Image (spheres, rainbow, N blue to C red):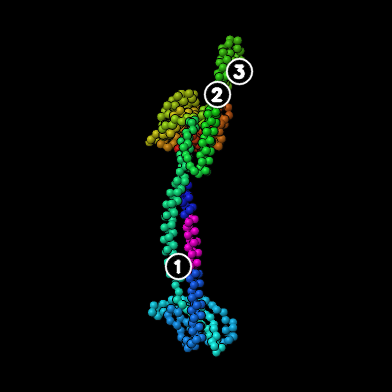
Amino acid sequence: MRLLHYTYRKLSILLFLLMAGWGVLFYYAIVEEVVDETDDTLENYAYLLIKEVLRDPSLLNTKGNLMSVYSFRPISEAEALDYREVFYDSSIYVEIEDEYEPVRAMKTVFRMADGQFYELTLMISTMERDDLRIAMLWYLSGLFILLVVCTSIGIRWVLKGVFRPLHKLLNWIRHIQPGKAVPPLDNPTQIREFRQLSDAAVSMAGRSYKAYEEQKQFIENASHELQTPLAIVRGKVELLAESETMTEQQMKELDAIYATLNRAVKLNRSLLLLSRIENGQFTEMEDVSVDDILDGILPDLMDIYEHKQVRLSRQRGEAPFIIHCNHSLAQIMLSNLVKNSLLHNVEKGELQIITTPDSLQIKNSGDAPLDGGKLFQRFYHPVKGKKDSNGLGLAIAQTIARSVSLDLSYRWEEGMHCFCLVKK
């Protein structure tokens, strides 16, 4: 989820809760204020009525009008002494409208000049709470919608400007590529945190590029320095083998030394290739046909392992399997997979290569399943005694596959080792 949308959602939820809480509090505050004012009116009206009754006792027989209904009831002195003035909500039936209308009522007590106590019940019409609640709900809803719309537009306009330096920084980071100089970042902003983030990103990118160049140079130098003495030693061994004074036993020892040197040369090349792949030095990417590469490497590899008499079965899909990869890396990956299936195949075994528009399967005959968790680890030898393997072929294939968003996996299926390459 984008930061802008995430901020919108959080602010909208917060605004909704605040408006809902404010609306409830506002409603009860208004009702409380109305009730308080009504009670003050009742007290004032009661004071005036009592004053008039004391002046004219004949008013004790009156009951008031529609808007303010009052009545007088004589009570005993004992009841009057324990009397407490009360206010309460009630209703009164209105014949004209044929319904009950809400009223606010008050009961109090007073004494006439002759010593008789009277209870005064006074009622005045008040607003209907249900109508007030509905009216406030509509008004608050309209206010809320208007406020949300205006706030959303304002927040979007403000946040787009606030986050613009962050978007520029992200776009700048996307254009950074391993092995290429860090491009300049023109991202002026008044926000201190974004300035610090931009400075940190530029500094980190610079350090990364410097470390990359140093590592690249070290690997190339180390590989070159190793290749030179290995080539010299191999040449010395070849010259020594041509000597006529060498015995048969010495020739066997020289042959073993020469084979070991060849494995060391292959190992050096493989490690250098792995390092270059992991460092992203193969930047030239293109759409590569897996089928075309297989057609190019299969004849040579089948000739090399002709002594095993492996039967080849080739199945093609309706369309070629196309991957976006460096052509040289794709050729190395597929060559290692096919070579592994031929090298570890049984005598007179079977090799099946199946391609679809989205996958490649390479199956070869085997005696027992392998450990899929360790198979793609470096220097892992699933079959003991295989001197032709340095344990890096599948590791290189896995590294290449991951670098171009491909999934390389292994499974044991009906007496055959199956390596599957699919797009993620």
Mark 1 or mark 2, earlier in chain:
1
- From the image, state whether disc 3 or disc 1 is nearer to you: 1
Name the residue: 46% across, 37% down. Answer: 186
What residue span does the magenta drawing correspond to?
13-31
Name the residue: 54% across, 33% down. Answer: 207
Badge number at residue 418 = none
What residue did someone put label 3 on? 253
Disc 1 from disc 2: Cα separation: 83 Å
- Decide which of 283, 359 is in the foreground and name it: 283
Mark 3 or mark 2, earlier in chain:
2
Quadrant of the image occupied by residue 382: top right
How would you rate the neighbour count of disc 1 (Cα within 10 Å): few for under 14, some for 14-19, many for 20 or more? some
- From the image, state whether disc 1 or disc 2 is nearer to you: 1
Q: Secondary structure at mark 3?
A: helix
Name the residue: 54% across, 22% down. Answer: 224
Residue 150 showing in the rendered view:
yes
What residue did someone put label 1 on? 133
Quadrant of the image occupied by residue 223: top right
- Decide which of 10, 85 is in the foreground and name it: 85
Amino acid at the residue labelled 3: Glu
Amino acid at the residue labelled 1: Arg
Question: Residue 369: image x %, image y %?
Answer: 54, 35
Question: Residue 236: image x %, image y %?
Answer: 57, 15
What residue did someone put label 2 on? 221
